[in-house]
Amino acid sequence: MSRTETDSIGPIDVPEDAYWGAQTQRSRVNFAIGEERMPIAVVHALALIKKAAARINDRIGDLPPDIARLIEQAADEVIAGQHDEQFPLVVWQTGSGTQSNMNVNEVIAGRANELAGNPRGGKSPVHPNDHVNRAQSSNDCFPTAMHIAAVGAVKRDLLPAIGELCEALADQAARHNRLVKTGRTHMMDATPITFGQELSAFVAQLELAEQAINATLPAVCELAQGGTAVGTGLNSPPGFGEAIAAELAALSGLPLKSAPNKFAALAGHEPLAALSGALKTLAIALMKIANDLRLLGSGPRGGFAEVRLPANEPGSSIMPGKVNPTQCEALSMLACQVMGNDVTIGFAASQGHLQLNVYKPVIIHNVLQSIRLLADGCRNFREHCIVGMQPDEQRMAEHLERGLMLVTALNPHIGYDKSAEIAKKAYQEGTTLREAALALGHLSAEQFDAWVRPETMLEAGQHD
C-alpha cells in the first residue's frame, strides 16, 4: 500500500505507513548505496534543532503557537527514539546532509499532522519546509546536528569509559607498586622496574589522550545554526543563531554556543578534524596498552608469561586448552579502525570547496563510529581483561634474577667497561652475573651483593 506525496520535482509514491514524504522517498531510490545508515544520534540531534527552532519562532511570533506545539510534540517523540525506523537514509547521500535534514522535517511534519487529526504525512496543517524548517537550512542544521551528536557522545559515553579504565589500571598499579620485575627496551632486557610503574605509564597515556579530547570540545560546541545557506543568515531573524544556541544548550545540557563565524562553520570542519585527531591519540595509547599486555601475557611456557590474562573463552578449534589474548586483539583492531577513520575525516574535512563542505555525512559517520568503538572498547577491556589480570610473580622473579642489565648497578663502582665484560661473560657462558663477576675478580661477593640490589634500582640516585 502506498500514498502519493509531492515535492518540487513532482509526485512520487510513498509507503502508506511512512511518516516521511517525497524528498525522503527520492533519496531512498537515488542513493541505494551500502548499508551504513545515517547515525541515529544525528537524527535525534536534528529533531532537537527542530524543537528549539519551533520554540524560538513561536516566541518571536513567526510561527503559530498551535503549529509550534505540534512540532515540539512530534520532535519529542523522535528524540525519544519512538520513530527510529522512519529514518532509513544512508550516509552516502548529498554531502550537505540535505536528504537527512528533509527526512527529519518530513517525519516531524507527518507525525504532527497525524497528531492534529489528519492522515500521517502530507503538508497540512504542518509543512515540512515552511514550518518545521523555518529560519533554517540543511547547510546549517546538519553541521549543528553533527556537533551536538559528537559532543553528546563524547561526554555521555567516551569520557566516563576512559575514566573507568584509568581507575582500573590505577588500582592494579597501586596493588603491585612494589613488585619488581625486569624492564625492557628495544624488546631486550633492561634495568628493573616495578609492575606498578609499568602500569602507571598506561594510566598517564590514557590521561593525556583524555586531556587532548577535552581540549577539542569547546570548538565542537560552537554551532553553525543561524548561518542558513551560505553563512549570511538569510531568511532567519536577527539574533536567531544566538537564541537557538542558548535553547539547544538548555535542552541538551551541553555547553553549546553560537559559532562566531558562520561562514567557517559551514565551509570547514576543523573542530571535528581536531576531535578525530584526539580520538586517534586515544587509539594509539590503547594500541600500546593492548600490545604490551599481549606480550607480557605471551606463553604460557614459550613466552614472557609474566601476566596472566583472564581466560574468557577457548582459543583454538584444533589445539585443546589453548587460550588467546582476545581482548587485546579486539582492542588493537578497533584502534586500527579509529586510525583509519581519522584518515578519512582528514581527507573529507579538507574538501570545503568555497562556502560549503560537502563531505559532512561521512565525517560524522566516522567520528561517531570512532567514539562508539573507543567507548565500548575501553569498557570491555576494563571488564574482561584489566580487572581480572594477575601478575605471575614467580616468573617475574626468574626473569629478574637472570637479567643481565642488573649489571648497570656496577657502573658507578667499577666502570662501564668492566661491567660490560661481566655481562658479556655471563651471557656467553650462561651463568649469572654474580658468578661472572667473581670469576673475573672485579669485585668481591660481598660487594656484588651490596651493590646489585634490584629494589634499589627503581629511582634516580638509589645506589650506595
Image (cartoon, rainbow, N blue to C red):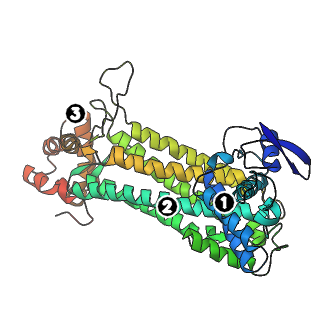
In whole angstroms, how far apart are the C-alphas of marks 2 and 1?
24 Å
Res. 327 mark: none
Locate the N terminus and report the quarter of the image it occupies.
top right
- Give the labeled residue for mark 3: 429
Locate the C terminus and report the quarter of the image it occupies.
bottom left
In whole angstroms, how far apart are the C-alphas of marks 3 and 1?
81 Å
Q: Amino acid at mark 1?
A: Ala
Counting residues from the N terminus, which is met first, the one under dot 2 or under dot 1? 1
Picture quarter containing residue 266?
A: bottom right
Task: Establish if 147 lies above or below 329.
Answer: below
Q: Residue furthest left?
A: 446
Circles 2 and 1: CB atoms closer than 8 Å? no
Question: In the displayed structure, does residue 426 sit left or right of residue 316?
Answer: left
- Residue in front for this viewpoint, 321 or 427: 321
Residue 406: x and y, percent? 23, 50
Residue 356: x and y, percent? 80, 61
Residue at 22 percent across and 43 percent down: it is 396
Residue 73: x and y, percent? 64, 63
Residue 294: x and y, percent? 37, 40
Residue at 61 percent across and 46 percent down: it is 340
Question: In the displayed structure, does residue 236 sit left or right of residue 165?
Answer: right
- Give the labeled residue for mark 2: 156
Circles 2 and 3: CB atoms closer than 8 Å? no
Res. 74 mark: 1
Q: Amino acid at mark 3?
A: Glu
Task: Establish if 25 lies above or below 104.
Answer: above
| Of labels 3 and 1, the one closer to you | 1
